[in-house]
Amino acid sequence: MIDTVMVGKLGETETAAVGIANQYFFFFHMFLIGIAFGCAIFVAQFWGKKDVANIRRILGIGLASSIVISLIFMLVGFAGPSRIIGFFNREPAVLQAGAVYLRIVLIGYIFAGVTFTYNAALRAVGNALLPMMISGVALFINAFFNYVLIFGKLGFPELGVVGAAIATVIARIAETVTLVASVYLTNGVLAAKLKELTSFTLQYAKDTYRIVLPTLFNDINFGLANLIYQAVYGRMGSQAVAAVQICNTINNMFMIVVFGLGNAATVMIGNSIGAGREEEARSYAGRFLLLSLFVGIILGTLLALSAQPLLSFFNVTDTVSHASRIILYTMAAVFVVRILGFMYIVGVLRGGGDVKQAFYIEAFTMWFIGVPLTILGAMVFRFPVYVVNALAVTEEVAKCILSAFRVKSGRWIKNVTRDLVME
């Protein structure tokens, strides 16, 4: 939110450029989430058994995987930043600014990979406080350097989008160093020696990836679908991109609560299953779904009420402001459905180890409902951006319904550590 508001002060072109460049990070981010939270399913269930040795093996697999993926994305990004931006938008000003921004922020990708893995593992063993505190520090660092480097304050040069990129890299490096140092200084369960991190066999890694891969494919699938959405908006012009980017930023500020609930459900349900308390896992699932319903109503109402005041922070034209306001009201109207769908998929099905079914549901609703309707609305019927965005939201409704049937069946509880080769 801070990044987008500060860059938004520079104008619509800069907002669109940074938003498009960050779509590449978003896709990379989906790989990281798939790996980190796929491994976290194991960590949560092993923590239920208090099996420290296998937690550290899984952490090693997660770190190795995240670092390899980070390096691949960095190499591809450095090889062709302009081509990546051009996939979404070909306006010369947007293309130039986006490529410059992307080339700099790529440096922080490997640090993001390490941070994601440790954050997911820490939450899985019940330590949500440490990553929260360190993320708060990183947020402050990012905001401070954004302020001084974007606008040229306190004697620093005025760098615009370049300053925003440098600030992001500084914050990512500081976050990773602080997080890893804290893990080892506190000597917790994740303070593993290199020998412990690499003590897994090839067969062990293969068995682990039988669960990690569906989670990874699920998030890659989600990322690809969102790239298609952004490419469609990009073809509609920079004003459409700016409107969607602003609304997604505001919406994500509210969705943070949802992400927290989903992660908490994954950990608590996974711990219960790992400890052999399946009825407790079912009870947690029901409670989290009920909590999500009430939270969704409250947050949806707050989003609708705050739409206009929040939009006033952005330096955009009346056309962009009008479209953004309608999109935000649409998001507010379906917020309950969105939070329930997220809780079903991430909190309950993934937490319960039912990762394949979660993947099938999300893949079907995105590629057979959301993506086709969005392309038809934008490219065939030429609807305004707020109508196209509303068509994309229909997948959320279908996902929620299908997930509800799966959870009601009771076949979602799977102890993923039971068949894992342990040495």
Image (cartoon, helix red, strand yellow):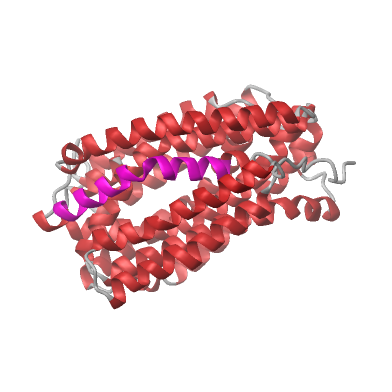
Task: Report which quarter residue 237 is drawn in.
Answer: bottom left
Q: Residue at x 13, y 49 (%)?
A: 315
214 falls in the magenta region: no
Tell which residue pokes out farthest to the left in this image. 318
Q: Quadrant of residue 416?
A: top right
In the picture, the quarter occupied by the N terminus is top left
Judge from the rendering whether residue 397 lies leftward or rightward of residue 275; answer left or right.
left
Extreme residue toward the bottom, this view: 380
Pick whichever, 249 or 98, lies toward us: 249
User: Would you say 156 lies left or right of 33 here?
Assistant: left
Answer whether residue 19 is visible to the viewer in this image. yes
Residue 120 x %, y %: 59, 38
Q: Nearer the viewer, residue 385 or 119?
A: 385
Which residue lies most toward the top here?
186
The segment highlighted magenta reads 321-346
Find residue 25 and report its horizontal and vertical position in percent.
44, 56
Q: Residue at x 67, y 31 (%)?
A: 282
Q: Is residue 190 visible?
A: no
Above or below — where is 385 with respect to 121? Answer: below
Q: Is residue 205 left or right of residue 31?
A: right
Of helix, strand and loop, which mostly describes the magenta segment? helix
Residue 36 as seen in the image, left or right of residue 275:
left
- Residue 342 falls within the magenta-colored stretch: yes
